[in-house]
Amino acid sequence: MSDFFERIKDLSPKRLALLADELQSKLNAMEQASSEAIAVIGIGCRFPGGVTDPESYWQLLKTGKHPITPVPPERWDVDEFYDPDPSVAGKTYTRWGGFLDGVDQFDPDFFGISPREALNLDPQQRLLLEVSWEALERAGQSPQQWTGSQTGVYVAIGTADYANLQTRAGNLTEIDAYTGMGSGFCFAAGRLSYVLGLQGPNLALDAACASSLMAVHLACQSLRQRECQMALAGGVNLILSPETNLAFSKTRMMAADGRCKTFDAAADGYVRSEGCAVVVLKRLSEAIAHRDPILALIRGSAVSHGGASGGLTIPNGAAQQNTIRAALAQAKVEPAQIQYVEAQGTGTPLGDTIEVRALSAVFQQGDRP
């Protein structure tokens, strides 16, 4: 620092003013880059109710169709594991869930995967490959554009039902070189980069209900820090075996009637569902320069943990408020400018109350509800 002052002490006032302007311009550019909006340029998705793309998802939302069904027989025999009494061991008190069609259907040749390897491939990995490809296509990105590129991959994944099924089969002699790579969470993200030829950061993560939002947050951070030039961020979940349902029944997390009654006096839990969604992200300036389709902008995001609260799974209202305010601050958006909020809405009397109070504390101003 002293060397810097030695070099500038003999500069004329005019030169000092020019230097100050130059330094200020560089600081402004750095600040702008660190908070640049992130453009969503492509989306791929699969959801219950026959949803295979954003258009069919929008139609599902518009019509209000209820895609929740009883557990299909190809998943497991729901009668074998059902009992309305939550205290009964080895049973679940709900028959319901959201399920995808054709999760056993996959074209391994398209992705250069051998039939033997595909047999051990968790259907969640298969879905991620298909939906990521679709998202890139919808973003107008050809394989020639993304192969070898600094594209990051951020995948939310937290269930290992396919591995449970393989273990339950009990034939240890069938474990081969592909078994571990077919079910390991790290390989869900790693396989995407490998198959698509992507050379940016790669991460699989599990943050419970926040997993996919965390993946998007980390992708945005990497883009702003110039760790990657494009990013794939998303999540996947399949319900292939009953173990998680049994565990969640013991904690009374799930709605017995298959309806998540958020912010309702009758709220009694949420409904487990399958799905996969991937977004393609770029810095706004580059999306504009490359004339990419810009579907939405992410101006700010924030993450945190509730720390010590009433229990491991009980939200911390004060921490929620701080996180919302941090996201607004990064986005340079005032609470009064927000017109729509999508809540977590777990459909529990305790969690819903804490969440709505946190939202009210941040967004309720004057006469505004």
Image (cartoon, rainbow, N blue to C red):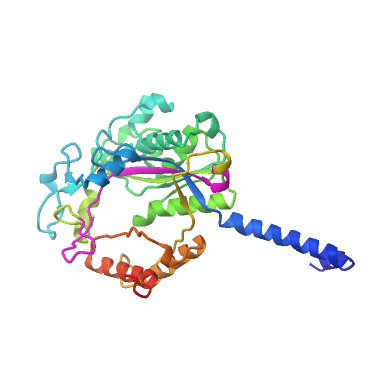
Image quadrant where residue 315 sits: bottom left
**123, 96: nearer the viewer:** 96
In this picture, which residue range is highlighted in magenta?
260-287
Q: Residue extending furthest bottom?
A: 366
**147, 12: nearer the viewer:** 12
The quarter of the picture where the N terminus appears is bottom right
The percent coordinates of residue 354 (x first, y second) are 30, 70
The percent coordinates of residue 350 (x first, y second) are 25, 69
Q: Was residue 280 drawn as part of the magenta stretch in this picture?
A: yes
From this view, report whether residue 168 is shown above or below residue 341.
Answer: above
Horizontal arrangement in the rendering, residue 28 relative to residue 58 (left or right): right
Q: Was residue 358 drawn as part of the magenta stretch in this picture?
A: no
Q: Residue extending furthest right?
A: 10
Please tell me which residue is depicted at 56% across the width and 57% down the height of the picture: 35
The percent coordinates of residue 154 (x first, y second) are 46, 47
The quarter of the picture where the C terminus appears is bottom left
Image quadrant where residue 291 sits: top right
The percent coordinates of residue 51 (x first, y second) are 28, 39
